[in-house]
Image (spheres, rainbow, N blue to C red):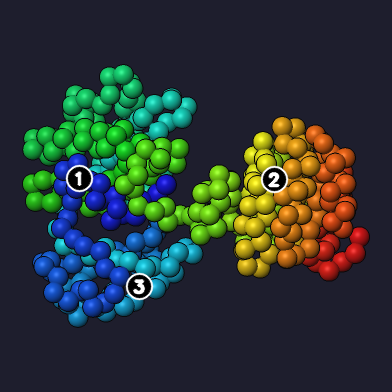
Amino acid sequence: MKLHEFQAKELFAKYAIPIQKGTVIERLEQLDGLTLTYPLVLKAQVLVGGRGKAGGIKVAKSLSEAKQHARAILGMDIKGEKVKRLLVAEAAEIGAEYYLAFVVDRVARRLVAIASAAGGIDIEDVARQTPGKIARVAIDPFLGFQPFHGRVLGRNIRLSGTLLNDFVKISTTLYRLCVTEDAELAEINPLAVVGDRLLAVDAKVIIDDNAVFRHPDLPRNEELTELEHMARASGLSYVELDGDIAIIGNGAGLVMATLDIVAHFGGRPANFLDVGGGATEENMRRAVDIVARKSGVRALFVNIFGGITRCDDIARGITSSPPPMQMVVRLTGTNEDEGRRILKAAGIHVYVDPEEAAQQVVSLVRGRSM
């Protein structure tokens, strides 16, 4: 679960990591009467990178200039995301920029601290072009990140004196935030020298989806669409895509294979929806309802291989609330005969061969007969 910059900075403030003074606005009028000192920086709040290159970050020296920039940024489309909010903060006079992050290294099976003197740019570019500028520390989960680790990292990026002390304090605090909040990534880029101190000018935090239930105070996940929220509340795995053929299957591998085979025959999947290995009649009914709600869907392809899942339960789920669109069903496995009988009684033909079924659903959408 990605947090917006302003949400990540709220977490930083909670843990006493130094940040700029600022606020979030959604309308131009909210700029009037702000108790912030100009110049101000206005930053689009979207869950994608490249805001600056897209024109989503501007500096304003006056209220009129701030309103001019806000008018241009609000409503802007940045990599498919519409800007609805701006973080307005006091601009900082930056002397130097550093990078600091804690990230889950799945190969090492532990958190890794990463620091670099090349802050303010994509760390991937630094790693590719000048890997010697990056310092790393793999963290023993029993020992944790200790102040001496921070000193090693800080000295490796040539910090000393007060700045090194600040770096040690910020890095140990950022590690505590990462562990306490179940973050997969906690990043400051840039960690800037402002005057004689370090300041977190930008913030990025990604919370482990599997741990969200442990943090009821987290904001709503804005990465998910309304249908994805609805599916998650029903215990279904659903991801929206940009096609016109809805896909339902049981088991992530089967659903992925179904997306591939539909695409192979020229179709465009509208979603990924996995009802799970032990799907019930109710699961199936909800799944059909959710995929049918997506605009632009012209046909539904249900691909079920019944193991734990009973084909008769799937058939009852489909027929209890049939979708308002053309449908192709491939059904095989446990209680297959009963499932076929139920679907046949409802006037639904059932396929055995998944390739034949995929070709049929693509033909229906494209207006061709097989």
Pointer 2 or 3: first along the chain: 3
Q: Quadrant of residue 313?
A: top right
Residue 108 picture location, percent across and down: 43, 25
Q: Residues within 10 Å of mark 2 (few under 14, many from 20)?
A: many
Q: Is residue 301 visible?
A: no
Q: Nearer the viewer, mark 3 or mark 1?
A: 1
Q: Residue at x 78, y 41 (%)?
A: 311
Left or right of residue 329: residue 138: left
Query: Between marks 2 and 3, how big is the CA–CA gap?
Result: 45 Å
Residue at image position (82%, 44%) is 339
Left or right of 251? Residue 362 is: right
Mark 3 sits on what residue? 74
Q: Position of residue 95 (x, y in %)?
A: 15, 52
Disc 1 residue type?
Answer: Lys
Label 2 or label 1, whichever comes before in sequence order: 1
**Mark 2 belongs to which amino acid?**
Glu
- Foreground residue, 364 or 90? 364
Q: Residue at x 13, y 38 (%)?
A: 166
- Up the image or down, 238 lies above or below 183; here it is below
Residue, disc 1: 14
Which numbered disc, 2 or 3, marks the residue closer to the eye? Answer: 2
Q: Which residue is mark 2?
A: 281
Q: CA distance from mark 2 to mark 1?
A: 45 Å
Give SS at disc 2.
helix
Would residue 16 be found to the left or right of residue 27 on screen?
left
**Mark 1, secondary structure of its residue:** helix
* Numbered mark located on residue 263 in the image: none
Give 265 or 117, whichever is nearer the viewer: 265
Image quadrant where one finds the C terminus: bottom right
**Pair 2/1: label in front:** 2
